[in-house]
Amino acid sequence: MSSRNVAVIGGGIAGISAAIALADMGSLVYIIERDTQTGGHAAGFACKATEKCNKCSACVADELILKVFQYPEIRILTGSEVMSFSGKPDNFRLQISRAAKEESLFEEVELKVGAMVVATGFMPFDAEAKKEYGYKKYKNVITALDLERSLRLTGKIAKPTDGSTPKKIAFFQCVGSRDESIGKGYCSKVCCPYALRLSKLIKSETPESDITIFYMDVQPAGKGFYELRKSCEGLGIRFVRNLPSKVYGYVNSDFLQVKSINADTGEVILDEFDLIVLSVGLSPQNDAKFLADTLGIDQDGHGFYRAKGELLNCSSNPGIFLAGACQGPKSIEESMAHGKAAAAEVGKMLRK
Ligand SMILES: Cc1cc2nc3c(=O)[nH]c(=O)nc-3n(C[C@H](O)[C@H](O)[C@H](O)COP(=O)(O)OP(=O)(O)OC[C@H]3O[C@@H](n4cnc5c(N)ncnc54)[C@H](O)[C@@H]3O)c2cc1C
Ligand code: SF4
Ligand code: SF4
């Protein structure tokens, strides 16, 4: 028997966008989210407005995360993961393992759905793997995700060692992206715009700060990117076309020295900083293969889910659609649009 019910696996911004669009089309939607809350990564981002909005979409994500609770047709199953699945399009059966109310107990739930949307997102690149940058070894080397979270929680930038305001700050671009030596030859697309917005915010709030962005080449991402770069340069943010090779420091000390090589002259440059922010890229989820094997969908050479079709929403298994960064790096705006497009594809299939 055909079912208009749909399962959305992953309750980040892409999954929520798909779920709302599906509910608007009359489907009963189950969001299967393994975390204790929905929203995914975007739920932890700070507003980067300076004298004006810098279009980071964090507030758009916040609004959507609240909106999903207004839909009785959307059942949110947090603490849940898909264990197995059977059937065919219009008639899938999913076995879900779900955290029960009593602590550390799991219950099995069976869902019958006509289609599925996979929206399991990404993992930030594990910065510890770039040992030469000293993440987790030197406290004042942080990731952009750490910075986003602390800006959201405290509204200010501080050195982890003593809570003081850093004066000299470096951003390292392409950490875990465009690096064939670690099997990540692709561009993560979001880290240039987020680093520029973060540095613009810091410079606007603390004009005395000295900010350098070390980059390979800044990737234009989306409309308004050149204006964003220009406004950063106008504020005195320095762009150095050169990725540092090493960070020197002492455990439990403030001292951080960055070694880089001038691309034009070959000269070795040593510079000191108070805080280093690693602009980590987007990697596939660690367990992306488990879900791919469970659902019978393909991965691409980098481990993201392989998509077919112009809108990149169809997986290799009919009836299973893709949304958001699980298919490849995307911004919040792109993930939301991809989620809505996945819902439209599901709608087309269920109407047949
Ligand atoms: C440091 C940093 C800063 C960024 N800043 C910006 C910014 O300012 N603006 C912008 O547009 N973009 C930004 N991005 C990109 C942004 O994070 C993504 O566009 C967005 O999070 C993608 O949404 P998503 O729903 O596809 O994935 P995610 O946000 O990763 O959500 C996926 C969800 O699926 C769940 N999940 C995963 N696996 C399973 C499973 N097997 N079963 C059930 N649930 C599962 C996860 O728990 C999560 O809730 C930034 C990224 C990083 C790393
Ligand atoms: S889009 Fe970003 S910068 Fe603009 S108001 Fe929203 S959260 Fe702030
Ligand atoms: S968006 Fe920028 S920082 Fe990120 S991988 Fe691409 S070029 Fe590197």
Image (spheres, helix red, strand yellow):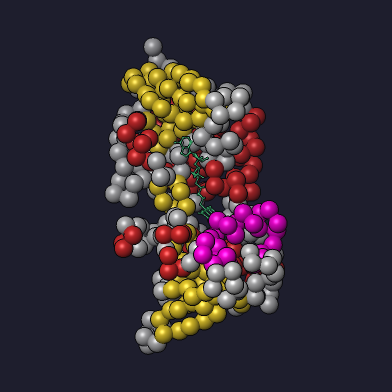
Direction top: furthest residue: 1
Residue 25, image x and y in percent? Answer: 51, 26
- Provide residue 191's location: percent of width, then percent of height: 48, 60
x and y percentages locating residue 74 in the rendered image: 57, 26
| Residue 350 magenta-highlighted | no
* Quadrant of the rendering where the C terminus is positioned: top left
143 falls in the magenta region: yes
- Does 152 appear above or below 276? above
Magenta residues (range): 136-159
Res 170 → quadrant:
bottom right
Q: Is residue 53 left or right of residue 346?
A: right
Specify the quadrant that holds the N terminus. top left
Q: Return the residue nearer the eye: 287 or 17.
A: 287
Please determine whether, in this image, residue 91 is positioned above or below residue 65. Answer: above
Q: For this view, does 188 lie left or right of residue 64? A: left
- The foreground one among 31 and 258 is 258
Q: Residue 86: in sight, yes or no?
A: yes
The image shows residue 233 at horizontal and vertical percentages of 56, 75
